[in-house]
Amino acid sequence: MSDLIEGYLGKTVEGKKSRVPAKLDYIQSATGLFLALFMWGHMFMVSSILVSKDFMYSVTKFFEASFIFDGGNPLLVSILALVIFIIFIVHAAMGMRKLPGNFKQYQVMKAHADNMGHEDTKLWFIQAFTGFAMFFLGSVHIYIIMTHSDAIGPYASSDRVWSEWMWPLYILLLLAVEFHGTIGLYRLAVKWGWFDGKDPKASRKRLKTYKKALTYFFLILGFATLAAYMKIGMEHADKAGERYVPSAKVMEYKINNGRVA
């Protein structure tokens, strides 16, 4: 009964204001921070293809724990993807609480934002829109990784991007993730006052500069990485499905064949 009363009135049976919204805000902030930092790390990992195919292959095998299991175990990547998926869904559920419930509410919020001309409010609308897009685009990507964790590598990933026509989705996902993530981190820092210092206004101005710089950096890195996978995928289109063999193994094979001969 107490939960029912609190749900309708927003207050406990003792007449105190409910702490549930604050707790849900904390969960949203914590999951958002985790996902944003994870996506930055993920971007650096996938961009390893810009160094070389061998380097990207070694990074992939590292996350498959090849230092423990001979040849690596893709199941570990599937488990990690599942954990990320659960956190992703929780974060999306928390974020949905603040979205307008109908078109009338949206009109009121939009008119209020236009009247105020407040930049941070406009950023909230961008974040809401990109978050909505990510819910669909991100779910597709994570599900594919979760169920095809053995198909990650210089050729396998490139084939998925090019031959399996995933590059349009990745372009949209890249834009949504980078704008949503950097805006989210900025709003988190402002909301919780992490870097306020003695002059919160000056701090907020600096944070906006950092936000823009990070957005440009990760968009450039992301599109350069996607272009690299598309190029490899195009070159490998006639052999789609073939897995990459690192240079060291090719050399070892040739040496062993030479010895046999």
Image: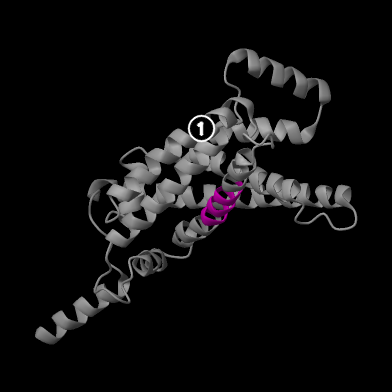
- Above or below residue 209? Residue 6 is above
User: What residue is rendered at 73% in x and 46% in y?
Assistant: 191
Q: Name the outermost residue toward the top.
A: 104
Q: Could one spot residue 232 in this view of the protein?
A: no
Residue 98 in which image quadrant: top right
Residue at label 1? Answer: 133
Going by the numbered disc 1, the residue's amino acid type is: Ala
Is 149 covered by the magenta stretch?
Answer: no
**Camera-side residue: 18 or 173?**
18
- Where residue 257 sits: x, y (%)? 14, 80
Find numbered disc 1 in the image and state the secondary structure of the residue it sits on. helix
Where is residue 210 drawn, in percent x and y?
A: 74, 52
- Determine the residue positioned at 81% across, 52% down: 206
Q: In this view, does 117 lie to the left or right of 250?
A: right
Horizontally, is 199 left or right of 175 in the view?
right
Q: In which quarter of the image is the C terminus?
A: bottom left
Nearest the eye: 60 or 127? 127
**Residue lying farthest right?**
199
Q: What stretch is highlighted in magenta?
A: 29-39
Is-magenta flag for residue 34?
yes
Residue at x-position 64% and y-position 44%: 184
